[in-house]
Amino acid sequence: MTRLISWNVNGLRAAEKKGFLDFIAREQADIVCLQEVKAIEGQLPPTLKDVASYRFYIHSAERKGYSGTAIYTRREPISVTNGFGVPGFDNEGRTQVADFGDFVLYNIYYPNGTANGDRLKFKLDFYEVFHQHALGQVASGKSVIVCGDFNTAHKEIDLARPKENATVSGFLPEERAFLDRLVASGFVDTFRQFETGGGFYSWWDMKSRARDRNVGWRLDYFFVSPDLVPKLKGASLMMDQMGSDHCPVVLEIDV
């Protein structure tokens, strides 16, 4: 069985000061995918790059202190590709595609659409490029696992206050429609295979201390291609894990 963790750490160097390395050592996951690392490799100390028994891969944004993704893995991938080959998207360090042979893993920090109308279009365009890329992998016979911060809550059950946020980016109809299309194309939200109830979130607004009241959003997901559904063993949210405004999400799968 393979245990995967995905976590938007809101700054990897900041996370280290909040116990990230203790978390890695304790959890002993096979693969840990991070989003919003906010660093280039040269800015990271050896303690973060040389974690015992893990290989480390990073895709940094060109803009300093912004975005970025990273993977710690015990399993040696056949290859790790940064980006989709689309410069407008790839220069923000949002995508890593790791081929492990038995499956292809996408680690993605999807854009936020809140800044202005241009960024919402950027987000929706990014969704589409990702979707076609992933469908191409499936069409070629690959098993696919997708994880990351999608920056969208899918259903009303996935955020504490859906009506109040109906016109807010992260819960707009056009953003949610992408997740509908992702599911319609065969991809499965693994968490909902094990938990159908409400009150489960992965992000809370820090300014309003929303975490204390569990007024949150489920923005972080593991999706899998349909052939992997019979191999699912567990999926969960580590809602008590501190260190970021997001919590880690977990997938256990027989691959």
Image (cartoon, grey):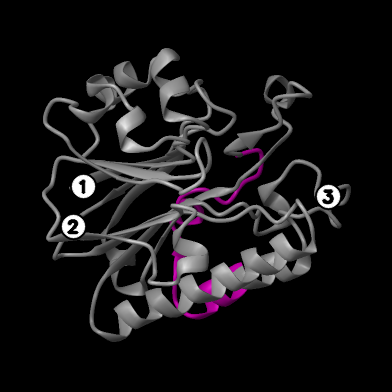
Residues tagged 2 and 1 counted as in contact (Cβ below 8 A): yes
Q: Residues within 10 Å of mark 2 (few under 14, many from 20)?
A: some
Q: Which mark is residue 2?
A: 1
Which three-letter amino acid code belongs to the residue tagged 1? Thr
- Of badges 2 and 3, nearer the viewer stands 3
Residue 171 versus residue 50 in the image, above or below: below
- Does the magenta portion include 30? no
Residue at 66 percent across and 38 percent down: it is: 199
Q: Which residue is mark 3?
A: 165
Residue at 79 percent across and 57 percent down: it is: 116
| SS state under label 1 | strand
Which three-letter amino acid code belongs to the residue tagged 3? Asn
> Residue 241 placed where, x, y %?
48, 23
Q: Earlier in the sequence, mark 3 or mark 1?
A: 1
Q: CA distance from mark 2 to mark 1?
A: 6 Å
Q: Residues within 10 Å of mark 1 (few under 14, many from 20)?
A: some
Q: Earlier in the sequence, mark 2 or mark 3?
A: 3
- Of badges 3 and 1, nearer the viewer stands 3
Q: Which residue is mark 2?
A: 255
Residue 98 versus residue 59 in the image, above or below: below
Which three-letter amino acid code belongs to the residue tagged 2? Val
Front-most of 197 and 138? 138
